[in-house]
Structure formats: structure tokens, C-alpha cells
Image: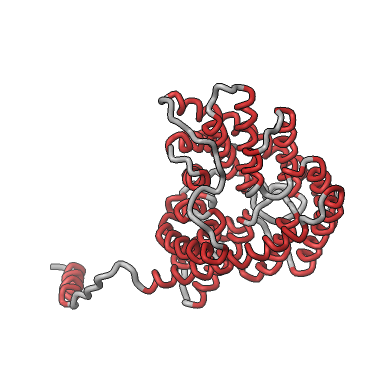
Amino acid sequence: MSLKPKKKLITYLNILDQPIKFNPFVFNRTFLLWAILGLIGGLIAGIYWIFLEFLTHQIAYFDGWLVIPSMAICGFLAGIIIHVIGDPGEIHLIVDNIRFNNGKLNPKNNPSMILSSLLCVGSGGSLGPEAPLVQVTGSTGTWLGKVFRLKGEELRSLSIAGMASGFTALFGAPLGGSLFSLEILHHKHAVEYYKAIIPALVASSFSYIIFAIIIHLGLGAVWDLPSYEYSGTFDFGLAVLFAMAATAIGWSFIYCTKVFKFLFEKKPIPIYIKTLIGGILLGVISYYLPITRYFGHHEINELFTQNFSFTLLLSILLFKIIAISITVTSGWRGGFIIPLFFVGATLGLLIHRLFPSTNLTLAIISCMAGINACVTRTPMSTTILLATLTGFSYFIPILFASLTGYFFAPKIPFIRSQMAN
């Protein structure tokens, strides 16, 4: 027998001689770490939401024509904060850090992101608080991992779990928020990140509990869609058709964003001038179409309750797309997931006006799923999030619509394309 097999045999015998350690529980120290991160994430999200609600109500007193100077001033102040404290970056930088920087998210940019996003979202910009929350809670995960001296995949998983806790706090869907934090990374080998699914689920669950306690969040749908009755397998085909229409709108939004990105970057100007110009333009749109103001969390229900004419709905659709594009490209901070849901809901209402025999709820839910999956490339989490937020119990039509938006999406994801000049 050669020396190498002898060494292997000795190694195996040593392993067999070691005493068996019995652990009756699956969880260990890392479980407690994920839980602590979720508690911290929920606390951060709850405090952020309280300040956002307060600021939103204070700025809302400036209505009518005063909305123009109020949004302009808020945009200017947000630009000053970014100029003085530092650029907090955009969501694509988070994606790059998770992929190429060993999952490390720098918390030093959090003060700038928190203050600037509060002004941008609270004053009525067409971006939501999901991106700021994801950056802050994700970097908190990185910080916690460094405190406990984690490295490699453990540190990356903790950062992703932090991101998931931020998503979950806003959407109130632990499973959807966890999947979103993985799918948003847009990696061709995305299965690699599913090592973080359990940490993300644990952190999301604890984050949801704390956030619900702080803001008195209840269980149930957020958006009140009319009741839906399944009428046969043909509904799946309709869901695909509606999603294809929404995908076309998604492409229009992407090209609209490219146009405004070119205009805002044609000449180098200070960030506070860009945010000032963006605030003026957004104020003008909000003055003529008040429902396009804000990111759409409450305005989606207003769409369903108000009897808007076809022409007005079409105007809302077009100018909401323009408002989101301006907000994204002018330096305002926030996320575009819920604003895209608003656009999809508006399109669904328009389709129902054109074809009254179609089921209204199916048209709305399919368009919401199609446009979001097209732009964000997140079909699984989009399906779960919409089912949770709308109370839509028929899961399969949403999945068909989400997959349609995903497979007809641009080859380069929208988040990645934002990096191109």
C-alpha cells in the first residue's frame, strides 16, 4: 500500500474516533444573527416611515400652484445634501457591490440617502422609499457582519438578508421581499445567491413584526381590487395579452428615461441644479394632474375609486411615465417599483375602458405584473408581492403575466442600463 492511501485511511479513522456532537436544533448562532438583523431592519424602516409620513403631511399643505415652488425647493435642498454630504449612489451600485465587492455595502452613504430621499419622496417625487430602505438595511447587514468578523458568502448573505428586511418592511410580504432581494441582483447565475434565501426569510420575518408593531400594520390587502371570478383557461391567455401591452409600456418607460438621462447629462451641471430643475418639472405635472404626485402607495386606491374618463386616464398614464423618468434621471432619490405598479394599474383601467367585456381585475393585475417584471426582471417576487398586496387569490394568472413581462424585457436590465452614459 502506498503512503497516500495510508494517510487517507488514518484520516478516516481519526474522524470515526471523534465523538458525535448532538444538536437538537437546526438554528445556531447565525440564526440569532439573522434575527437581530431583522429586528434592526424593522426598527430602521419603522422610524424612516414615521418621519416620511410626518414630512409628507407637512409638505402636502402646499397645494394648488404652491406645489411647484415647494417641490422645487425640496429638490434643491436634496441636491445640496447630496453635494455636501456625498452621493449615496443608486440601486445599480448596490447590485455591483453585492456581485463584485464580496457583498459589502458601505454604510457611510446612509445619512445622505436618508435625508435626500425623505425630501424627495415626502415632497411628492414619483419614486418610493424601497431603494433607500434597501441601501440602509443592506449596509446595516454588512456592518453587523463585520462586527462578528464574517467573510465571504456569510457576509454577502447577511447583506442580502438586510436588503430583504428593507423590502419586506415596505411591502409587508416576507417571502416576496426575500425573493426580491435575490432577483434584483440580475446575475446570469442567480442561483448562487439562493444560499442567502434562509437568512433573508428569517431577517424579513423579524423585520415585518417590528415594522408592523411600530406603524400598527395589519394583515390583508393594501390595494382594493374588485372581486375576480375565474372564467376558464382562456383567462391565462388574456393575462399574457395584457402583460404584452404592459411590456410595451415598460419599453416606452425605459426609452423615456434614456431621453431624459441624455438631456440632464448633456452639459455638466451641479447636482443641486439638476434636482431643482427636476423639482420644477415634477411640480408642474403635479399641479395639472395631482394624482401623479407621490409614489402611488395611496394613489392606486384612488384610481380604483374615482371615475376618471378615458382621456384623463391616458393623460395620467403618459405623464406618470414622464414623472418617474424625470425623478430617476434628475438626481432625486427613491425606488420605482410601486410607481410602476401605479402605471400598470392605470393601463389596466384603460384596457377595460376599451374592452368593457374583459375582467377589470385581471386586466389590472396582469398589467401591474407585466410592467414591473419587464423593467425590474423579477418575475417570481413580482408574482408573490402582487398576490400579497392585492389579495388576488388566483396565483397562476399573475405568474403568467410576470413571466411574459420577463421574457419580453430588454436584454440589458433597466438597472444595469442606468449606468450607461
Q: Is residue 71 left or right of residue 235?
A: right
How is the structure coloured here?
A: secondary structure
Which residue is nearer to you in this view: 168 or 144? 168
User: Residue 107 location, x and y as percent?
Assistant: 62, 69
User: Residue 354 location, x and y as percent?
Assistant: 63, 23
Q: How many marks?
A: 0
Q: Answer with the quarter of the image where residue 205 lies.
A: bottom left
Q: Residue furthest left?
A: 1
Compared with 210, 61 (above or below) is above
Compared with 35, 271 (above or below) is above
* Residue 271 shows in this picture: no
Tell me the quarter of the image containing the N terminus: bottom left
User: Residue 123 location, x and y as percent?
Assistant: 75, 56
Q: Residue at x 76, y 61 (%)?
A: 58
Compared with 60, 403 (above or below) is above
Which residue is nearer to you in this view: 69 or 413? 69
User: Residue 244 location, x and y as percent?
Assistant: 56, 29
Q: Answer with the quarter of the image where residue 202 lies.
A: bottom left
Q: Is residue 83 left or right of residue 133?
A: right
Which residue is nearer to you in this view: 200 or 318? 318
Q: Is residue 52 left or right of residue 370?
A: right
Q: Residue at x 46, y 50 (%)?
A: 190
* Residue 20 shows in this picture: yes
